[in-house]
């Protein structure tokens, strides 16, 4: 009988693989629970929605938060995913010393079409277990925003579904309102 155990990587090992070009600069991968996953190719709707969302958040939040697009975050469970959008607290080092960690993160957003099941069933538990207080999925399959809050263990105990043309407030910025038609532009 063959032993088929999988060996998990640490974040440091993952970084060394990047530094030594074992993982090339252009490779679209992310570390999830010690395993390297290829990231899905982005279709037109995904690209447009992500671009529009990023633009809207930059306008709405200005310099009150750091808005990152498809950049790594570091989680305690040997994970370094690259969410489509992260709203992080401002930090004096401008994140030069390290990627945002859970204590820095206000909101994680994934834009999902072909990755919808992965974003719900793999990334949601990952973010909940790391203590990310709010996680959004821009669901391009069903044209809706899924809001996950109140993490307990590896689940979010509260889920809301918001349909365009409604609006939502940005966590920690309750007076800042995002019109969902801005991120579902094809619904206009």
Image (tube, helix red, strand yellow):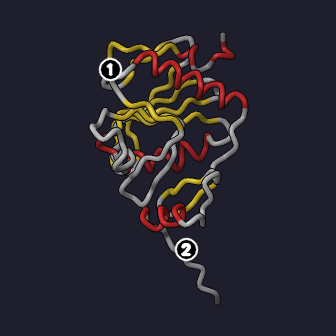
Q: Residue 182's spot in the image, x, y percent?
A: 57, 15
Q: Which mark is residue 74?
A: none
- The number of numbered badges drawn on the structure is 2
- Vertical placement of residue 39 versus 112, above or below: below
Give 186 or 3, whichever is nearer the viewer. Answer: 186
Could you classify mark 2 by the number of other residues whose Cα lies within 10 Å: few (under 14), some (14-19), or many (20 or more)? few
Q: Residue 77's spot in the image, x, y percent?
A: 39, 58
* Mark in front: 2 vs 1: 1
Contact check, label 2 and label 1, Cβ < 8 Å: no
Residue extending farthest to the right is: 44
Q: Is residue 1 left or right of residue 33?
A: right
Q: Residue 96's spot in the image, x, y percent?
A: 37, 45
Q: Is residue 56 left or right of residue 37?
A: left
Q: Residue at x 46, y 68 (%)?
A: 13
Give 98 or 146, whichever is nearer the viewer. Answer: 98
Q: Could you give the CA–CA distance between mark 2 and mark 1, rounded to whole angstroms?
A: 42 Å
Q: Judge whether residue 149 can be spotted in this image.
A: no
Q: Give the structural element (helix, strand or loop) at label 1.
A: strand
Q: Residue at x 57, y 60 (%)?
A: 36
Of the numbered discs 2 and 1, the one sitting upstream in the chain is 2
Q: Judge whether residue 116 can be spotted in this image.
A: yes
Q: Residue 71's spot in the image, x, y percent?
A: 50, 42
Q: Give the structural element (helix, strand or loop) at label 2.
A: loop
Read off the residue under disc 1. 173
Read off the residue under disc 2. 6
Could you classify mark 1 by the number of other residues whose Cα lies within 10 Å: few (under 14), some (14-19), or many (20 or more)? few
Quarter occupied by the C terminus? top right
| Residue 186, image quadrant | top right
Q: Is residue 39 left or right of residue 160?
A: right
């Amino acid at each position: 009988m063959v032993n088929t155990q999988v060996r998990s990587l640490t974040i440091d090992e993952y970084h060394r693989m990047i530094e030594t070009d074992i993982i090339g600069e252009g490779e679209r991968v992310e570390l999830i629970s010690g395993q390297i996953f290829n990231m899905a190719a982005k279709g037109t709707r995904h690209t447009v929605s992500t671009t529009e969302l990023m633009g809207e958040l930059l306008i709405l939040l200005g310099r009150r938060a750091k808005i990152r697009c498809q950049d790594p975050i570091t989680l305690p469970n040997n994970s370094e995913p690259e969410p489509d959008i992260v709203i992080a607290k401002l930090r004096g080092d401008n994140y030069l010393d390290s990627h945002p960690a859970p204590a820095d993160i206000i909101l994680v957003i994934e834009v999902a079409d072909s990755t919808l099941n992965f974003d719900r069933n793999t990334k949601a538990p990952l973010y909940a277990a790391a203590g990310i207080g709010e996680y959004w999925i821009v669901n391009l399959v069903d044209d809706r925003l899924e809001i996950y809050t109140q993490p307990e263990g590896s689940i979010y105990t509260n889920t809301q579904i918001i349909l365009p043309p409604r609006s939502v407030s940005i966590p920690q910025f309750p007076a800042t309102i995002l019109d969902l038609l801005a991120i579902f532009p094809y619904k206009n």
